[in-house]
Amino acid sequence: MYFIYALTDPRTDTVAYVGITNNAYERFKQHTSYRDKNGKKHAWIQQLQQEKVMPAMKILEVVEDEKTAIEREGYWMRYYMRQGAQLTNIQFHPVEPRTYKPIRKTVPSGGFSIRFSFSPSTINDLWAEFTLNRSLHGEEYIVSHKQLLEYHELNGTIFMNLKEEGRVVAYSSLMPLEEDAIRPLLLDEIRERDIPLTAIRQWTDPRISVYIASITVKPTGNLLTDRERGLLIIRHTLKWALSMDRQFDVKNWYGIGATKEGQRVFERLGFTEIISLYGGERKAYYIDDVKKPVRLINHLLQEMRPDEAE
């Protein structure tokens, strides 16, 4: 049994923190004894204690399993942010590791199993992703490794990767950004390496815009293998985007189709073309709610579904 709860200010009854736990008493003790690294929350609780009061824990909902609890936590965070609450949460990690279970796929030609996994990128993964991107595009035109680390430090859940037997073979990125930083990207006035750190937003911020920054696959020279990896990374990135849209206050989604295949994917997902450059070679797309074309998305996910056994 899991509890979705809020910490409230007893002086004003305003909500300052939303969380989940399977032991409400122990979790409350952890909050009031400063056992984590959330300085913003600590400062708020210390201010209360100086005024001889303590935060109150309000149980918002009770659910049976952790996955549902994480989804409902996102719902309540969005709800209170829309009410104007200034939450002290550092960052909600919306991509719960247990959602993306390893995939066992049997390769007919060899009769053996390959283990794939889709998960948030670690600092070590970012180096593998950087070297992959550098091998494809050269160092001059890509985001530097230092920048990737800085972006990751600001928001730890904007990079995801697909691993095959523990090695990164593809990656993708969904970046919540200031709206003013997205338009120059769409117009090709700046590139991703030019995105200022101040433009990176948190998933928990209200009314965010998300830029679908990249979906990249490590080429092997084998068209069937490359296609399989490509379908897997696209499929799980779509599921990731749907999860984010469901849990957070996303107002707009943007992406760039720099290839005919990429343009077809955006158009099949219900995105609207808003900019066309270089005779249609590069197009920018927009949608305000990725749940609207849910039938199209589900149909595309089914088409991309590999033979899986979990």
Image (cartoon, rainbow, N blue to C red):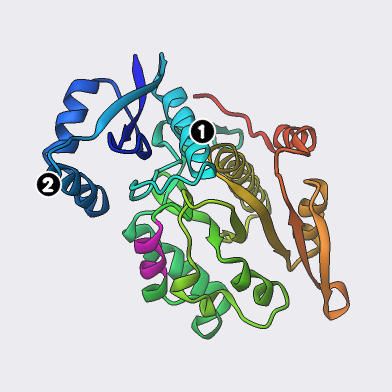
> Mark 2 falls on what kind of element?
helix
Q: Nearer the viewer, mark 2 or mark 1?
A: 2
Q: Quadrant of residue 14?
A: top left
Q: Is residue 271 left or right of residue 8?
A: right
Q: Quadrant of residue 286?
A: bottom right
- Mark 1 surroundings within 10 Å by alpha-carbon count, few (fewer than 14), some (14 through 19), many (20 or more): some
Residue 258 vertical position relative to residue 78 in the rendered view, above or below: below
Residue 162: within the magenta?
Answer: no
The residue where tag 1 is placed is 75
Whole-percent x, y for residue 50 in the image: 12, 47
Residue at image coords 19%, 37%: 31
Whole-percent x, y for residue 281 in the image: 82, 73
Residue 230 vertical position relative to residue 240 in the rendered view, above or below: below
Quadrant (top left, top right, bottom left, bottom right) of the N terminus: top left
Residue range in magenta is: 148-155
Residue at image coords 32%, 60%: 124
Residue at image coords 42%, 36%: 96
Whole-percent x, y for residue 43 in the image: 20, 52
Residue 154: within the magenta?
Answer: yes
Residue at image coords 37%, 38%: 15
Q: Amino acid at mark 2?
A: Gln
Q: Is residue 103 left or right of residue 233?
A: left
The residue where tag 2 is placed is 50
Q: Which mark is residue 189?
A: none
Q: Amino acid at mark 1?
A: Tyr
